[in-house]
Image (cartoon, helix red, strand yellow):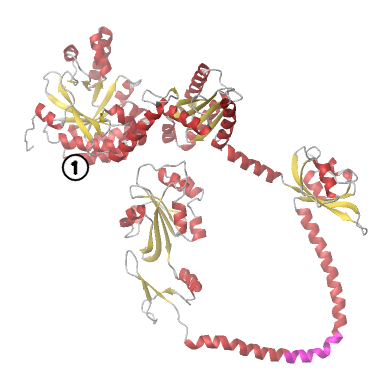
């Protein structure tokens, strides 16, 4: 199964079949397509995703709709073994014996790819064991007529090979009789002896007439040689005229005496008018190169010389000139003869290879190799104290949302446009390069001052943030975060300077949105802390290190506890109790918010189900919401496991959840409503289009952001906003909850204004389950 291992350990397979399922890459471009069956005899191919369901399938080289039912019996139980190490052996597949192998897809040796935290996808190959296959194996193993044992056939006892999912496979072959080997060895000698005797007799009889035919044979041989010579000359002429070479001859001074007809075909120039002209009149080389080459040709076999010539239509072509001296009977050079081979396509291909080695094929920007070479040259002056050098790392923000909504071709268009905008906003002696994905680097080789760098960063951000118009007419917008490191102040080597710029870029990707950050020494410690938190988060997500606290919500009129909001906290062994703003952004950026959110949903439903009438609200992250089907399944599972009635579960979403893909968001929200679960818009009023969302999406409640509630004590300006929100909610028939109520005056105003529910420190801080029991004792019911 070496072929299976080669495909499974390929970074390309991991990127296109695990990180995403790219059917164009796999089938259309035949990276994992029909050639496996056509060239290697693989009868069935399956790619099994992290959820153990097939995502790509080929049968006899043709695609088939992936279906778990297509997995051969016994294979599902081996999937986890395959992720630990490849599994292969004999299986029964569709009632036929087959060699089957399963291996996990990995990034291999590709340094640009990293595991995404999910279970590995698996690659499965099947090759049926037929009589034809066994026949070829039998020839190699000297087992005549090796085949599958036939039922009720009069054959000797077959060889039984065990399988992993059924009865053994039985094989049979033909065994030679003991005397056959002896006969096979002796009989050829007997036949050879008899044949030799016959030949000897014939030679004796033929010798008498051979002399008479000798003269006739010699005459015929001369005629045949003459015909062969003429045919050889014709073949040489045909090859010479069909090739891309043209043949030339000169006298001892390199003046042309002959040009083949192929010269006129390739150049469009008549050969007759060039006879007698110096060869370098039609061919040009580097200054002095042709004269030196011609002089050397008189005493040594000359090496080929690369020359240029111009065709009749003005096109410049490149050829390789080869020659050898022609000598007379006295050994003196009488002229030269050679060929000119057109190598224009070869030179262009070589130039293209060099370009691909140093430039990104999508954006045509320099790649990392050329960037490092340029940066090393710029730093040589900076290290000597002659000038400063600035290295910028630029990461596009919200670019992933474009590709998720509009597809990879649209993402490529935006990426190419962004690269052009970056290139148009740098100086002639600066360089911008693409490092991969949506990340770029820029080297300013002689910035005038820090202020000049800040001005350049502002130009770059403005250029990147301007709207992009897709071919379909849709308009999208992205941003960028920029990290800056200076040499020689921060580092003096290319690797260290780019690392410092990357640390600054990570800092610029902070919670307040993408910005610009200059490297400082303490960023190392901040990045180390972030990496520690990320490592610990991956290790402990959903464990006992996480707890849920519950923020009580009260009826404004009666102050009865009617609901709670579940809030997750992390009891970190080193950093202590961490609030959500210290780890939720990290969980979202790594995708760990999905398992963490599912854990919080299950725990909250299980806890609040113990009360007969409390409603629990759970926050849903935008990252979690994008996994629409997975989120719906998590809700169903949490309700089923806990027994909590759907009407007592409420999900809180911010407007950011709805912005990326409005149609998909509406579809998911409608499915949630079908389950009977409530929906609340959190932080209402902080977005730019809340009203349109309330009209078009099935929300039950809005939550007034704490910033507006805190402004109630500031006079009519703050109160006017809250009054408008309450009036809007009444017009749309929505309930209202005010967050962050911290004073009695705020509560009094909200009560008079008709707010339905309130929550905040004025009433109670977030409670543990035990503390919540003191606020509202449970009552046993049998309802």
Q: Which residue lies furthest to the right in this view?
A: 330
Principal secondary structure, stretch drawn in magenta: helix
**Mark 1 Cα-neighbour bin, 10 Å: few <14, some 14–19, many ≥20:** few
Quadrant of res 715 = top left
Q: Quick check: is 452 in the magenta stretch? A: no
Quadrant of res 238 = bottom right
Q: Residue at x 51, y 55 (%)?
A: 35
Query: Where 254 falls versus 395 (above or below)?
Result: below
Q: Residue at x 27, y 30 (%)?
A: 575
Q: Which residue is drawn at 32% across and 64% down?
A: 165
Q: Residue at x 79, y 89 (%)?
A: 206
Evaluate whether residue 627 shows in this view.
Answer: no
List the residue tagged with mark 1.
Answer: 641
In the image, the segment drawn in magenta is 200-212
Give x and y (percent) for residue 729: 24, 19
Give x and y (percent) for residue 221: 84, 75
Q: Residue furthest front?
A: 384
Front in this rendered view, residue 131 or 346: 346
Q: Quick check: is 207 in the magenta stretch? A: yes
In the rendered view of the protein, which quadrant contains the C terminus?
top left
Query: Where 228 falls versus 434 (above or below)?
Result: below
Evaluate whether residue 154 shows in this view.
Answer: yes
**Badge 1 element:** helix
Front in this rendered view, residue 361 or 382: 382
Query: Where 480 falls versus 605 (above or below)?
Result: above
Residue 264 horizontal side relative to residue 450, left or right: right
Front in this rendered view, residue 608 or 450: 450
In the rendered view of the protein, which quadrant contains the N terminus?
bottom left
């Amino acid at each position: 199964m070496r072929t299976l291992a080669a495909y499974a350990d390929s970074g390309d397979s991991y990127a296109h079949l695990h990180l995403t399922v790219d059917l164009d890459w796999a089938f259309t471009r035949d990276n994992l397509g029909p050639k496996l069956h056509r060239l290697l005899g693989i009868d069935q191919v399956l790619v099994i995703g992290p959820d153990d369901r097939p995502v790509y399938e080929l049968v006899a080289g043709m695609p088939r709709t992936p279906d778990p039912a297509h997995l051969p019996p016994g294979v599902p139980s081996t999937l986890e073994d395959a992720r630990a190490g490849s599994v292969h052996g004999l299986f029964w597949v569709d009632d036929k014996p087959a060699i089957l192998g399963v291996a996990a897809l990995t990034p291999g040796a590709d340094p640009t790819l990293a595991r995404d935290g999910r279970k590995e996808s698996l690659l499965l190959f099947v090759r049926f064991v037929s009589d034809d296959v066994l026949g070829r194996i039998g020839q190699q193993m000297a087992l005549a007529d090796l085949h599958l044992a036939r039922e009720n056939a009069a054959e000797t006892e077959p060889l039984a090979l065990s399988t992993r999912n059924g009865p053994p496979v039985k094989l049979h072959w033909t065994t030679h009789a003991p005397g056959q080997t002896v006969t096979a060895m002796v009989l050829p000698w007997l036949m050879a002896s008899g044949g030799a005797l016959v030949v000897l007799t014939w030679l004796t009889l033929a010798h008498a007439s051979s002399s008479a035919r000798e003269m006739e044979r010699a005459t015929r041989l001369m005629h045949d040689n003459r015909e062969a010579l003429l045919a050889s000359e014709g073949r040489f002429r045909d090859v010479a005229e069909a090739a891309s070479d043209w043949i030339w001859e000169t006298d001892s001074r390199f003046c042309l005496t002959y040009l083949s007809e192929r010269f006129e075909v390739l150049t469009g120039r008549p050969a007759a008018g060039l006879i007698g002209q110096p060869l370098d009149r039609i061919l040009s080389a580097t200054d002095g190169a042709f004269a030196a080459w011609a002089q050397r040709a008189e005493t040594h076999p000359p090496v080929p010389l690369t020359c240029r010539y111009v065709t009749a239509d003005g096109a410049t072509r490149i050829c390789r000139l080869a020659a050898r001296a022609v000598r007379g009977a006295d050994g003196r050079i009488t002229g030269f003869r050679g060929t000119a081979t057109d190598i224009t396509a070869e030179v262009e291909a070589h130039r293209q290879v060099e370009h691909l080695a140093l430039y990104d094929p999508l954006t045509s920007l320099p790649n990392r190799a050329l960037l490092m070479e340029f940066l090393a040259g710029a730093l040589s002056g900076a290290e000597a104290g002659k000038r400063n050098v600035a290295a910028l790392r630029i990461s596009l923000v919200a670019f992933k949302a474009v590709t998720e909504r509009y597809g990879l071709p649209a993402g490529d268009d935006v990426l190419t446009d962004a690269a052009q905008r970056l290139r148009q906003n740098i100086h002639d002696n600066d360089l911008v390069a693409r490092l991969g994905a949506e990340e770029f680097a820029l080297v300013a080789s002689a910035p005038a001052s820090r202020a000049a760098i800040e001005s350049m960063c502002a130009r770059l951000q403005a250029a990147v943030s301007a709207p992009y118009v897709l071919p379909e007419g849709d308009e999208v917008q992205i941003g960028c975060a920029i990290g800056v490191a200076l040499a020689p102040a921060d580092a003096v080597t290319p690797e260290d300077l780019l690392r410092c710029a990357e640390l600054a870029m990570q800092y610029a990707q902070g919670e307040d949105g993408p910005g610009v950050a200059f490297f400082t020494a303490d960023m190392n410690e901040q990045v180390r802390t972030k990496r520690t938190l990320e490592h610990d988060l991956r290790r402990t997500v959903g464990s006992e290190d996480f707890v849920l606290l519950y923020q009580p919500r009260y009826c404004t009129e009666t102050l009865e506890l009617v609901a709670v909001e579940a809030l997750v906290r992390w009891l970190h062994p080193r950093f202590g109790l961490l609030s959500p703003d210290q780890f939720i952004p990290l969980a979202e950026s790594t995708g760990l918010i999905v398992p963490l959110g599912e854990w919080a949903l299950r725990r909250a439903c299980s806890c609040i189900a113990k009360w007969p009438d409390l409603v629990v609200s759970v926050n849903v992250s935008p990252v979690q919401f994008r996994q629409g089907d997975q989120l719906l399944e998590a809700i169903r599972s949490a309700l089923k496991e806990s027994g909590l009635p759907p009407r007592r579960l409420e999900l809180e979403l911010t407007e950011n959840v709805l912005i990326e893909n409005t149609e998909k968001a509406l579809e998911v929200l409608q499915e949630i409503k079908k389950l009977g679960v409530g929906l609340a818009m959190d932080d209402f009023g902080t977005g730019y289009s809340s009203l349109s969302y309330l009209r078009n999406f099935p929300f039950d409640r809005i939550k007034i952001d704490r910033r507006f509630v805190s402004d109630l004590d500031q006079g009519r300006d703050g109160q006017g906003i809250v009054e408008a929100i309450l009036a809007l909610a009444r017009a749309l028939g929505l309930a209202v909850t005010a967050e962050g109520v911290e004073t009695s005056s705020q509560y009094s105003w909200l009560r008079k204004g008709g707010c339905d529910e309130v929550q905040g420190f004025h009433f109670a801080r977030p409670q543990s389950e035990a503390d919540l029991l003191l606020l509202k004792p449970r009552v046993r019911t049998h309802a």
